[in-house]
Amino acid sequence: MKCLKDGKSHNDPHNLLSGNMINDFDFLTTCDISGFLKEEIRSILIYKSDVKDSDIVLDINCGVGEISSEFSNLAQKVYAIDESPQATTISQENIKKHGNIDNVEIINEDGLSAIEKIENFDIAILHAKNGNCNEFIDTIHEKINAKGRMLFLTNFLDIEVNIINKLDELNYNPQITQVNISKGQLLYKGIKMESQDPMTIIFAKKR
């Protein structure tokens, strides 16, 4: 059992949602990798995934490793997958700093090829990069364990529609959550709210 400094279990996702998420500004980033997910979106992913300490998690197209960092403190094992060597390098640094690196296997490989080699997993999180996600969804559907959970992230409408149509074709009942994060910036005239991270989260559970 992993514990936080305040004595709370680090294997309980509700503890993370009550204020123990990793701060956005604590992650190492680079201009060559697209922006990381804000802590509010990460908290929704943790909640929707219903992650347990016996779960094996795939973080596909992991970017700077912010999701892998969070889930490494909650799950039995995390596969952080990205075809970019720079992404896997910075992911490793972020996971070492914020997560449990002993629970993570970092894979520098095309996401689809990596999934096909992994035999056992309970949660798959896909950062959808293009409109043709069908092969990814087919492979995840075939390989994920019974009652496994899938979470797809996108901020492109065409990708969202493609994912929903494919899940419907496979007889899933996808849940769609659109999140718009706005944060206040203190100006001399008052507080200005600025949108920072619009994102659609699509959740599906294998029956």
Image: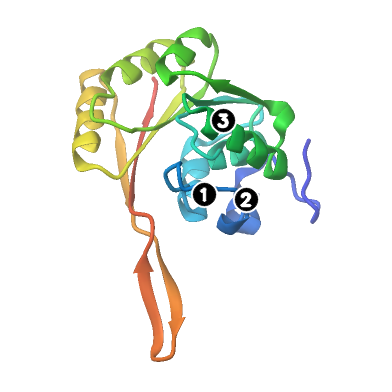
Q: Secondary structure at mark 3?
A: helix
Q: Residue at x 71, y 38 (%)?
A: 96
**Could you classify mark 1 by the number of other residues whose Cα lies within 10 Å: few (under 14), some (14-19), or many (20 or more)?**
many
Q: Are marks 1 and 2 in contact (CB under 8 Å)?
A: yes
The type of residue carrying mark 3 is Thr
Identify whether 165 is placed above or below 1.
above
* Position of the C terminus by quadrant: top left
Q: Earlier in the sequence, mark 2 or mark 3?
A: 2
Q: Earlier in the sequence, mark 1 or mark 3?
A: 1
Instruction: Kindly identify which numbered label has been placed on residue 88.
Output: 3
Q: Secondary structure at mark 1?
A: helix
The type of residue carrying mark 1 is Ser
The type of residue carrying mark 2 is Leu
Position of 193 with respect to 97 (left or right) is left
**Could you classify mark 3 by the number of other residues whose Cα lies within 10 Å: few (under 14), some (14-19), or many (20 or more)?**
many
- Using the image as rendered, state which of residue 100 and residue 107 is in the foreground: 107
Q: Position of residue 202 (x, y in %)?
A: 33, 37
Q: Which residue is mark 2?
A: 16
Q: Are marks 2 and 3 in contact (CB under 8 Å)?
A: no
Q: Earlier in the sequence, mark 1 or mark 2?
A: 2
Label 2 and label 3: CA atoms lie apart by: 24 Å
Q: Residue at x 26, y 20 (%)?
A: 134
Label 1 and label 3: CA atoms lie apart by: 22 Å
Q: Position of residue 25 (x, y in %)?
A: 58, 58
Q: Residue at x 66, y 30 (%)?
A: 53
Callout in the foreground (1, 3) = 3
